Image (cartoon, coloured by chain):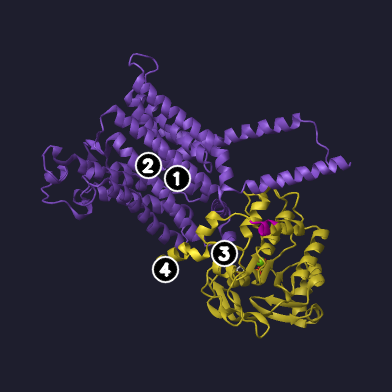
Chain colours: A yellow, B purple
Amino acid sequence: MSMLDNMRETMRRDQVWNFLQPPSVAVNVDKQILLYIENLSVSFDGFKAISDLNLYINDGELRCLIGANGAGKTTLMDIVTGKTTPDTGSVFFGQNINLLGKTEAEIANLGIGRKFQKPTVFEAQTVYANLELALAYNKSILPTLIASLNGEQRDRIDEVLNIIGLREQRAMIAGALSHGQKQWLEIGMLLIADPRLLLVDEPVAGMTAQETERTAELLTSLAGDHTVVVVEHDMEFVRSIARTVTVLHQGSVLAEGSMQDVQNNPDVIEVYLGESH
Amino acid sequence: MTGNSSLATKQHTLAQHTLTQQLSPLHQLREKAPMFIAVLFGVTIYASICNQFVPQDSIFYVSTYSITLLGKYLCFALLALAVDIVWGYCGILSLGHGAFFALGGYAMGMYLMRQIGDRGVYGHPELPDFMVFLNWQELPWYWQGFDQFWFAMLMVALIPGLLAFVFGFLAFRSRVAGVYLSIMTQALTYALMLAFFRNEMGFGGNNGLTDFKDILGFDLQQDQTRIALFITTAIILAIAYCASVMIMGSKLGRVIIAIRDAEDRSRFLGYKTEIYKVWLFVFSAVIAAIAGALYVPQVGIINPGEFSPLNSIEIVVWVAVGGRGTLYGAVIGALLVNYAKTRFTAIMPEAWLFALGALFVSVTVFLPQGIAGVLKENNWLRRLTQRTAQPAGGQA
Ligand SMILES: Nc1ncnc2c1ncn2[C@@H]1O[C@H](COP(=O)(O)OP(=O)(O)OP(=O)(O)O)[C@@H](O)[C@H]1O
Ligand SMILES: [Mg+2]
């Protein structure tokens, strides 16, 4: 049955010219909360990577997630983006959209973008083509086959190229970029689709001090229209952008609040900040 | 200074133009097809004319045997193209494409069998000889309709396409990839081989289908028919090549390469990669099947040996030698390796497999990009020398 559905989905004529449509499912954020994560647990071969985690992300906020290596930050993103299925718990996008059971592609098309911890771009293709691939449009097969860039999309790519500072490199093969440039390109691929929620895993690893600063500016400027969740180990960076910080420890939330509160929290000092300072 | 900067902006807009142009499938076609088509039809027409109009004792004469051989090579080239589409562009290493080739061949073979009519050894008006021999009383249901050319051609594409769809759907849905997928494709072709060996299947058992008489009313032994088949094969190869260039040059092609290089990334961008892979697999299988259908009337036989797992592995070697991920590379690889095979097996037939193995290993070690890689590199070198020969441009 789903075979037939897929075919129908692919063949739908009314979707063919539907380029550049922002994700159309209306997310219900009446309660000002965009992401609800409740009682979440997942274990790998008996090891509890996430245990009974509760987390609410407000609409339009910039949230920093910190925690020691192996605290479960990346795993949490894997669950929200559909890569990993949790054992128990629920994940809702707004009040109305249950993310569990949806595939990665479906979740992405709802307007949830993700940057990987290890920069992942399409190395064999040009910077320009990488951005083209990341544009928001109807991503089923037939529209993709006949897709060609319209003026609006070209302007959008140029705009993003300027933001990420890769204008000169746009004809370059992405595999030839430096580590930091790949980070920027991946951020650009995230930006270009204009997602509602951005999950950004360690964006400044491998960046110079100036680049880090620019990333901080960029992420801060995105908040408001977009909701941004940033995972980062660089405490300087976190301090420069953080409004609310959530500390994860052994798969659950240890503390939450402003950077000040969190830094003064005795539990946090004991398990995390205390060690690294 | 002003002159320099206006030059820079001009260069800039020019670069912008070529950059977006490169993303257009028509542009890709204009870049890649003319040379290919010129060489392909140059050789095809030259060989055909030399066969028909040059006296047999001339050194320019091309024998009908050679024409058939060339036609066979072109079928293999088409088959290599099919494998390159999935392997070179999407990283799906299929070691079972021989199965789609053979199924297409069997569908054509069934049509050719029905064309024999009552001219068989037993002279039965409807049943092929092997069925009479097995004491079968009537034609099995799945042989119905194959006396119609259009129906047989439909089945050439439909049956392998359907098999590829079901196989691909199950495999890609459960995210089977890499070596496991390759093993599954080997198992598929092996299972089909065992099935087709059985007499009860109704496909002629280990003898397969043979002793064909004519196609669309034309005698298969005639030179003209052979030439027509050869030219048809060339035309279909050209069409498949152009279609593939356009698909791979479209955004769809870029998504497919993206899936090859970072499937997870593509998923998180919103592409349903499984569905892309299934349809690419089907497209590739149908091309392989058409190659099989063109092959059978030219060689005059189809038997279960075509399903042999080894055959499918050979195709992968052709593509590796030619250079995967470049469509013309696959074609060159198929032609060269098969020419070498013809030459080699004439001298030492037992040693061919060793030679093939050695070829594969040395190509993997010394020419990871295959012959196409060498061609590309030279091209690149030439462009580089051209650029350094030019006076250094004023960069502000
Ligand atoms: N697919 C998996 N299979 C087995 N164990 C896993 C898997 N994914 C994560 N883990 C384990 O779960 C724990 C949490 O990993 P996770 O990657 O979420 O940590 P993290 O907070 O992102 O750490 P880091 O700061 O080092 O990136 C780790 O101990 C890791 O080994
Ligand atoms: Mg991590």
Disc assigned to residue A18: 3
Q: How many marks?
A: 4
The residue at label 2 has a CB less than 8 Å from ligand 1 = no
Residue lying furthest bottom? A31
What is the CA distance from the residue labelled 3 to the residue labelled 1?
33 Å
| B213 in the magenta segment | no
**Circle 2 residue:** B291
Q: Quadrant of ligand 2?
A: bottom right
**Circle 1 residue:** B83
Residue type at mark 1 is Val
Main SS, magenta residues: helix
**Circle 4 residue:** A2
Q: Which chain is indicated by disc 2? A: B
What is the CA distance from the residue labelled 3 to the residue labelled 2?
37 Å
- Residue at the spot 51% in from the left edge and 74% down from the top edge: A101
Q: Residues within 10 Å of mark 1 (few under 14, many from 20)?
A: many
Q: Earlier in the sequence, mark 1 or mark 2?
A: 1
- Residue at the spot 73% in from the left edge and 51% down from the top edge: A178
From the viewer's perspective, is the residue at label 1 or at label 4 nearer?
4
Label 3 and label 2 in one chain: no
Percent of width and height locating residue B44: 42, 29
Q: Which chain is indicated by disc 1? A: B
Residue type at mark 4 is Ser
Label 2 and label 4 in one chain: no
Task: Decide which of B339, A206 is in the foreground and name it.
Answer: B339
Residues rendered magenta in the picture: A150-154
Label 3 and label 1 in one chain: no
Residue B174 in sight here? no
What is the CA distance from the residue labelled 2 to the residue labelled 4?
31 Å
